Structures are given as C-alpha cells and as structure tokens.
Amino acid sequence: MADFPLADLEPGARNLLLACAGAQPGDRILLVGETGKDLYFEPELCTAVAQIAESLGLKPEIVMAEPVAHAGEFPAAVRAAMERADRTIFFSRLGDQVRFNLEGSKAVMTYTLTREHLAAPFASADFSAMKQVHDALLELILNAKSWRMTGDCGTDLISDIKPGRDSAIAEFALELFPVMIFPPVHCHNMRGTLAIKHFVTSSSTRAYADSTLVLDQPVLAQVEDSRMVAFDGPAELVSRLKKQLQRAAELTGGDPYRVNSWHTGINPGTFYKGDPYEDLEKWGTVAYGSPRYTHMHAAGIDPGDAAFHLMGQTISFDDQLMWDKGRMVFLDRPEIQAMLPEDQRGFLNSSVLHDIGI
C-alpha cells in the first residue's frame, strides 16, 4: 500500500472526528484498531487519525484488539477504554459486531479500510450534508406504504411497509462513517422472486466458520410472507444453500428461510480494489456502501446471520424511483443536490459509480 501524507488524510479525518463524531477540543477520543491475522483495517489508520486528532486539540488513545466471534465476546479492555473516553471510533470489525446493540455509547463504526479510502471523496464527502440526504431518503421510506425491487438477475420483489419507525426499520446503535446506507428496511409480507447469485456470506453480526458459500449458478427463491418457500436451481447447489442457511440460523435458533431486512448503498464514492473472492467478508465490509449493491439479511432471528448480495437493482417506494439499475437517481433531485456543497456535486450524483470488483 502506498504511503499517504497526513495532508492527504486530513480532510477525511476532520470529517470523521468533527462532523461525524462531534468531537470538541479537549475530548478524549478512543481509536480501536485490529490486531491478529487477516486484518480488514490498516493499523496505520489509527496512528494517522491520532496525529490529526492531536492537531485539533483532541486527546487520542489507541487500543488494538483482535476481532471476536460475536458481541458477547466483546473485549473487556476495549469496553473499559470506552468508559473513560468521550468518543470511540472503530477501525475494527468489533464495531460492526455491536452496531445493533451498543446502547449508551457515543461510538462511530468506520468503513475506511485503508488510508486510500480515508484520502478519497468516499470519506471526505461532507458528512453533515450526506446525513441530510440520508434523512430525506429515510423520511420518504417511512412515509411509504410499499416498495418494489427488480433486477436483470431475475429478482422481482414487492413488500409492504409497516407504519411506525420501529416497525419499518432497524436502527443502528452507533454512527456509521462515512454515510453508507439507510437503516435496514424490514421485510413485511414480502413476496415474489429473489435471485441468489454470486455468493452467500455472513451478515457481519457474528463470525462463524465457513461463513461464505460461492454459487457458480444462480438460485431463484420463491418468497411468500418474507419467507423463502421454494428454490429453483441445480439440486446439489440448492442442497448446499439450504444447509448454509440452516447453519446460519442455528446461531440464534430462528427460521433459516426468513428474509428479515435489506439496505442499499447511498455513497457513490464507494470503491474496492482487489479480488473480492480473496476475502468476501472483507469485501462486503466496504462494498455495501455502493448504490450498485443491495444487501439482504436472512436466516435466523433479526437481523439474521446470512446475507445475499444483489447488484444493479431498480428500487421504488410507492412508485417513486430511487435507484435505477444500481444508480441512485434520488441524488439527482434538485432539492437533494441543493443540500450538497457545490464543489462536491460533481461526485455525488447518479452518474458516479466506482468499481467494487463485481
């Protein structure tokens, strides 16, 4: 990985520390990084952000820890460090594993896997403006009665939306940086056809052995009331898929064929360099922010422990088109563009789509 001067990292780091984390001079900032094998996040991120934090009058502390299998194994040393910090920023999968259940914490989960990500518009796009975009989209979703998702892959799904915020979406327990997605939309009376392609992975909530299953052919699942009731594909592949879903569901004791929720990326600057198949779980940690990518949670008690990965979907809420074949056309609305800084509108629109490897 090429070296990056601090000056290149500073816009993204300031966006993270000040706009996202809301840090004030004198605040104690805990930076949690990864140790061990097969790292997802560059350890150098913590060092670089700590230096920039100091220049802003903040008091950074770095704690490195190995990722764990699930939230129940959250390291005591990290928890203790969080208790003495005013803000916690995760450059670690640890944050992902507690994103739904870390109550009472002023914490941020980052998806800047590398210094290259931190130096790019992916991270420097104005956080406050992107939150306005996020909130406008979320308001539209919460006021909708239904959604529809279609794709060239064969997916064609329709679902109702339950009234009420808690019924419609699954809130995160910490802030995400950069702005990547809206809170997952619950599947309520979802019906139609779901094309399961490419691979199945974990949902990142829990780590478990052999969590990825590569599919050399698509499997079409017929869905009724948000549950996969029939599978069309090669018999041997369908059998492997069912076993994978059953293994995932056993972690919580839930229904292996239940599709719980989904979200689609809203950050056009999302990119991934390298071969996704070298580590699909790592790839999914950042790629899910791309508007091309729709991520479905399934198998087990909400959110579930298996994920399906749909590319280039067309998605509408109450017949209002939001994504057109993976391009977030919602961004092009005049009232949405008006929320964005003029100098950033050129890379925050539906024409911008970076390579995510698939």
Image: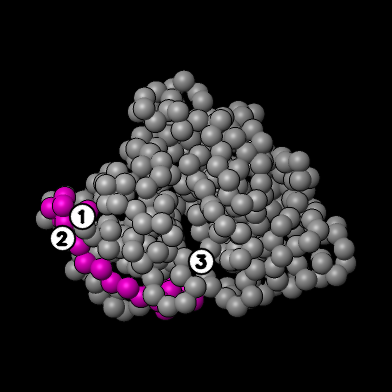
Q: Which mark is residue 336?
A: none
Could you tell me which residue is drawn at 52 percent across and 48 percent down?
A: 271
Distance, label 2 to label 3, CA atoms, is 30 Å
Amino acid type assigned to the residue bearing label 3 in the image:
Thr
Q: Which mark is residue 205?
A: 3
SS at badge 3: loop
- Over which residues does the magenta segment extend? 52-73
- Figure quadrant of residue 106: bottom left
The image shows residue 211 at horizontal and vertical percentages of: 62, 71
69 falls in the magenta region: yes
SS at badge 1: helix
Q: Mark 1 Cα within 10 Å, few/some/many (few <14, many 20+)?
A: many
Q: Is residue 182 visible?
A: no
Task: From the viewer's side, name the closer residue of 134 and 143.
Answer: 134
Q: Is residue 356 above or below residue 35?
A: above
Distance, label 1 to label 3, CA atoms, is 29 Å
Task: From the viewer's side, name the closer residue of 281 and 306.
Answer: 281
| Whether label 1 touches label 2, CB < 8 Å | yes
Amino acid type assigned to the residue bearing label 2 in the image:
Lys
Q: In the picture provided, is 322 more to the left or to the right than 92?
A: right
Residue that carries the numbered disc 1 in the rendered image: 53
135 falls in the magenta region: no
The image shows residue 148 at horizontal and vertical percentages of: 67, 38
